[in-house]
Image (tube, rainbow, N blue to C red):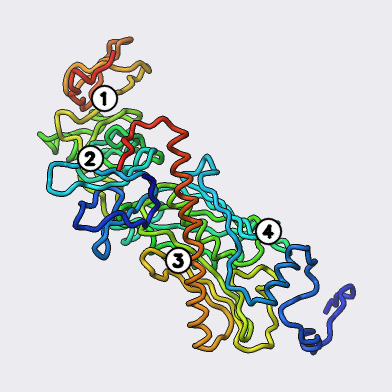
């Protein structure tokens, strides 16, 4: 059933407000123009939500896993462009920062950014904070599953990961240092 | 001192030519009267209208924008496109907790009787501020921290009450873009001339004589489902009782325009479903 923004859906005693709705004056009203979805989640009341056909515009939230591309590096931090939140692509790029102390979980002070990331690498990271007035989103790769997933060597070929801190170029067989992500085997594609 | 001989100097003392004109009520003779406007002007004179012009609204026509809407009311035509949420360019303290609405109201150079320059004049900046003020209470900005939503309204033909229709158009475009809103914002304007008032005035009805007292124009932006007024812009001098009455008439006008806006939005939602093959469950 299509609804418009501001339409009264039901009273607050009948359902719980879900995505795309809000409650006011004891009623649940839609906040999106879309279709109403009522689901029984197993709690006492069904959850009512409004969905639109296009993907919901996701914003990077604290704790979300994001896919980003490194744009510039600096001995203290790496600047990235956030491209995907989870598996939904973003229409506009958001900027993020990975600080030196957030690259690894162990030996945080001995990290060298030049040996962990290079401009152009695709990195899986997690959002730790939305940042304050001056900074961008703060990201971390201090977990085994986070880090560089795709990187190109200086010769231009896509490198193959050897260990958690090294990747090798298949053309020149040169090894380069990166903070590599341990991707689960079922997600690896040939 | 070099004197410019080519310029014709005007007299030192000058007076407004309006003082010497005969008192005509509300009908400036320089506007060419088409048959329709004459018919409407006649019916206006006879009835003292509280009916707004019938509105045509359509969503989703600008393919590059996130959401868009087009409104036609009489001869007034406007188009609005919404982009966002995007990362904010400037960072203030307030951006961190909630998003920001950046509005731009433009009159196309060919929209008015006299050609407007492309550079934004002070009138456009004023109307932009009013537009932003009216739309802000309707949008759930706290759901979009650190982002900005851009709303661009372009008036293609200005035949009166441009701001009121711009507010309606912008809120339809925001809803079409999937931005979460508390409610649609509907705008309505009124022209008060002495004891008579006209709802949703056309361009020639908007200009009256300055000599009558208790005259002015009023634009009201309303959130109909929550019954809250989000914007009020008034020019001219009106008595208090007249102003209160005028606001009430405008609010009723907004309520009457609400179903048209709802229908337009529902049509666009249905059209999107037919356009894409969806895997979303559609159900009650």
Residue A57: x and y, percent? 35, 43
Mark 3, mark 2: which one is toward the viewer?
3
Q: How many neighbours does mark 2 have within 10 angstroms: few (below 14), some (14-19), or many (20 or more)?
A: some
Kindly state the secondary structure of the residue where label 4 is placed.
loop
Chain letter belonging to callout 3:
B
Marks 1 and 2, how far apart in space? 17 Å
Q: Residue at x 20, y 54 (%)?
A: A14
In the picture of the structure, the residue carrying the numbered disc 1 is A149
* Quadrant of the rendering where the N terminus of chain A is positioned: top left
What numbered label is drawn on residue B111?
A: 4
Q: Residue at x 14, y 38 (%)?
A: A109
**Mark 1 and 2 residues: CB-CB less than 8 Å, in contact?**
no
Mark 1, mark 2: which one is toward the viewer?
2
Kindly state the secondary structure of the residue where label 3 is placed.
helix
Residue B75: x and y, percent? 67, 59
Foreground pick, B173 / B8:
B173
Marks 4 and 3, how far apart in space? 23 Å
Marks 3 and 2, how far apart in space? 34 Å
**Mark 4 and 2 residues: CB-CB less than 8 Å, in contact?**
no
Going from N to C along the chain, the mark reached first, 4 or 3, is 4
Chain letter belonging to callout 4:
B
Kindly state the secondary structure of the residue where label 1 is placed.
strand
Kindly state the secondary structure of the residue where label 2 is placed.
loop
Marks 1 and 4, how far apart in space? 54 Å
């Amino acid at each position: 059933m299509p609804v418009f923004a501001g339409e009264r859906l039901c009273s607050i005693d009948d359902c719980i407000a879900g995505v795309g709705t809000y409650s006011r004056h004891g009623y649940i009203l839609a906040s999106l123009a879309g279709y109403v979805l009522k689901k029984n989640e197993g709690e006492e009341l069904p959850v009512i939500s409004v969905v639109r056909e296009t993907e919901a515009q996701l914003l990077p939230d604290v704790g979300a896993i994001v896919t980003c591309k490194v744009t510039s590096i600096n001995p203290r931090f790496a600047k990235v462009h956030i491209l995907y939140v989870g598996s939904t692509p973003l229409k506009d790029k958001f900027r993020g920062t990975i600080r030196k102390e957030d690259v690894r979980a162990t030996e945080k002070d001995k990290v060298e950014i030049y040996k962990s990331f290079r401009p152009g690498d695709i990195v899986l990271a997690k959002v730790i904070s939305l940042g304050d007035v001056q900074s961008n989103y703060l990201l971390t790769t201090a977990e085994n599953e986070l880090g560089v997933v795709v990187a190109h060597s200086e010769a231009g070929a896509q490198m193959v990961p050897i260990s958690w801190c090294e990747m090798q170029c298949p053309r020149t067989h040169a090894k380069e240092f990166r903070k590599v992500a341990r991707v689960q085997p079922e997600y690896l594609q040939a | 001192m070099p004197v410019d001989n080519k310029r014709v100097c005007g007299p030192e003392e000058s007076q407004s030519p309006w003082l010497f004109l005969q008192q005509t009520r509300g009908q400036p003779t320089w506007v060419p009267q088409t048959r329709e406007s004459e018919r409407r002007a006649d019916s206006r004179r006879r009835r003292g209208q509280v009916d707004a012009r019938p509105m045509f609204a359509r969503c989703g026509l600008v393919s590059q924008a996130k959401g868009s809407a087009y409104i036609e009311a009489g001869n007034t035509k406007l188009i609005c496109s919404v982009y966002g949420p995007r990362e904010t360019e400037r960072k203030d303290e307030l951006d961190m907790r909630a998003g920001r609405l950046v509005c731009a109201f433009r009159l196309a150079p060919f929209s008015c009787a006299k050609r407007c320059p492309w550079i934004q004049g002070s009138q456009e900046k004023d109307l932009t501020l009013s537009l932003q003020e009216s739309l802000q209470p309707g949008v759930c900005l706290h759901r979009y921290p650190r982002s900005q939503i851009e709303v661009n309204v372009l008036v293609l033909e200005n035949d009166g009450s441009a701001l009121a229709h711009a507010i309606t158009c912008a809120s339809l475009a925001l809803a079409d873009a999937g931005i979460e809103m508390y409610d649609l914002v509907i705008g309505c304007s009124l022209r008060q001339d002495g004891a008579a008032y006209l709802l949703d005035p056309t361009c020639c009805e908007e200009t009256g004589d300055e000599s009558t007292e208790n005259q002015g124009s009023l634009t009201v932006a309303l959130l109909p489902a929550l019954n809250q007024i989000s914007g009020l812009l008034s020019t001219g001098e009106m008595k208090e009782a007249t102003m209160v009455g005028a606001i009430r008439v405008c609010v009723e006008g907004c309520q009457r325009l609400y179903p048209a806006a709802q229908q337009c939005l529902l049509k666009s939602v249905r059209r999107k479903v037919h356009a894409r093959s969806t895997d979303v469950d559609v159900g009650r």
